[in-house]
Image (cartoon, grey):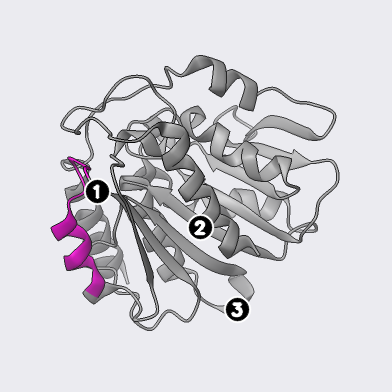
């Protein structure tokens, strides 16, 4: 078991070199609005007893479903950059969270979805889990390990991401959607094509024409190595919201 886990972690570490560029949440107005509580959504930061951040939670005052959403951020990306996406679904009445792994590096917090699931264990009995870039790689690994019925994982989404060479999900019997941008400079068309051998045959693939790597989160700074998008961030996010919404419903 130790050798298996060690090999998996080594494999995940290799992906850091693909997703290493530092990025921050510069689209401050959208992020600030998403991170602000209202009469309909409570926004909070959950920490452990030592003060270490575990996740940002978005709790609807009037839930419409017992299904929730967990997002793993891209490598070195400020988790708050995904707050508008989480808040969108909280506004619709779904429990949502963005995990906050150590050093904004998902590989160091693969298990962080457990904290979210435990916190809302009485409210949510099914989870849609996924992530962006390296966060998607980590989410795929989490889902692979936690695929038993009692783990309450109902679906997986990958945003400009794919499972690593040690994570084969071909027998996974839950819905999976892989979404990527047509002009992404980091996650290429070939990467997506190569990943198909490690994903279930029923996986849905969504290519966003004109979308790039950066617009899967909220920033005004083009991520290093990415190509300028040919569509707006709102247009790209709308497609992501639609596809995740299908999984939640």
Residue at label 2? 243
Residue 70 is one of the magenta-drawn residues: no
- Answer whether labels 1 and 2 touch (C-beta < 8 Å): no
Q: Position of residue 102 (x, y in %)?
A: 42, 34
Magenta stretch: give its range: 183-196
Point out residue 247 in the picture as x, y percentages from the top left corner: 57, 64
- Quadrant location, the C terminus: bottom right
Residue underneath mark 1: 182
Q: Residue 95's x, y, as percent?
A: 70, 48
Q: Residue, x 36% and y 40% (percent of image)?
A: 74
The CA distance from mark 3 to mark 1 is 35 Å
- Look at the picture and state if 220 lies above or below 197: above
Pick whichever of labels 3 and 2 is earlier in the sequence.
Answer: 3
Asked if residue 227 lies left or right of residue 238, the reply is left
Taking 205 as reference, is 187 above or below it? above
Residue at 73 percent across and 52 percent down: it is: 120
Name the residue located 63 percent from the left edge and 21 percent from the top edge: 33
- Element type where label 2 sits in the image: helix
**Residue 134 placement (x, y as % from top left):** 31, 46
Whether residue 166 can be seen here:
yes
The disc label shown at residue 149, or none: 3
Which of the 4 quarters of the picture holds residue 210? top left
Element carrying mark 1: loop
Check contact, mark 3 vs mark 1: CB within 8 A: no
| C-alpha separation, residue under disc 1 versus residue under disc 2 | 16 Å
Q: Please tell me whether mark 3 or mark 2 is closer to you in this view.
A: 2
């Amino acid at each position: 078991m130790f050798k298996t886990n060690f090999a998996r972690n080594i494999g995940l570490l290799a992906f850091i070199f693909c997703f290493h560029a530092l990025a921050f949440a510069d689209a401050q107005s959208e992020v600030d609005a998403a991170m602000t509580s209202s009469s309909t959504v409570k926004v909070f930061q959950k920490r452990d007893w030592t003060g270490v951040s575990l996740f940002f939670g978005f709790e609807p005052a009037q839930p419409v479903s017992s299904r929730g959403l967990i997002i793993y951020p891209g490598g070195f990306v400020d988790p708050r950059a995904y707050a508008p996406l989480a808040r969108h679904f909280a506004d619709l009445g779904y429990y949502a969270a963005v995990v906050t792994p150590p050093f904004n590096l998902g590989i160091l917090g693969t298990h962080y979805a457990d904290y979210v699931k435990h916190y809302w264990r009485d409210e949510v009995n099914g989870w849609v889990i996924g992530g962006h870039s390296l966060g998607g790689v980590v989410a795929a690994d989490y889902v692979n390990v936690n695929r038993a019925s009692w783990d309450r994982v109902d679906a997986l989404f990958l945003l400009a991401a794919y499972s690593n060479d040690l994570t084969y999900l071909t027998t996974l019997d839950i819905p999976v959607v892989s979404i990527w941008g047509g002009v992404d400079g980091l996650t290429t068309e070939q990467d997506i094509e190569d990943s198909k051998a490690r994903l279930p045959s029923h996986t849905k693939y969504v290519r966003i024409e004109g979308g790039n790597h950066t617009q899967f989160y909220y920033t005004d700074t083009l991520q290093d190595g990415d190509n300028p998008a040919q569509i707006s961030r709102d247009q790209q996010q709308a497609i992501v919201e639609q596809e995740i919404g299908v999984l939640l419903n």
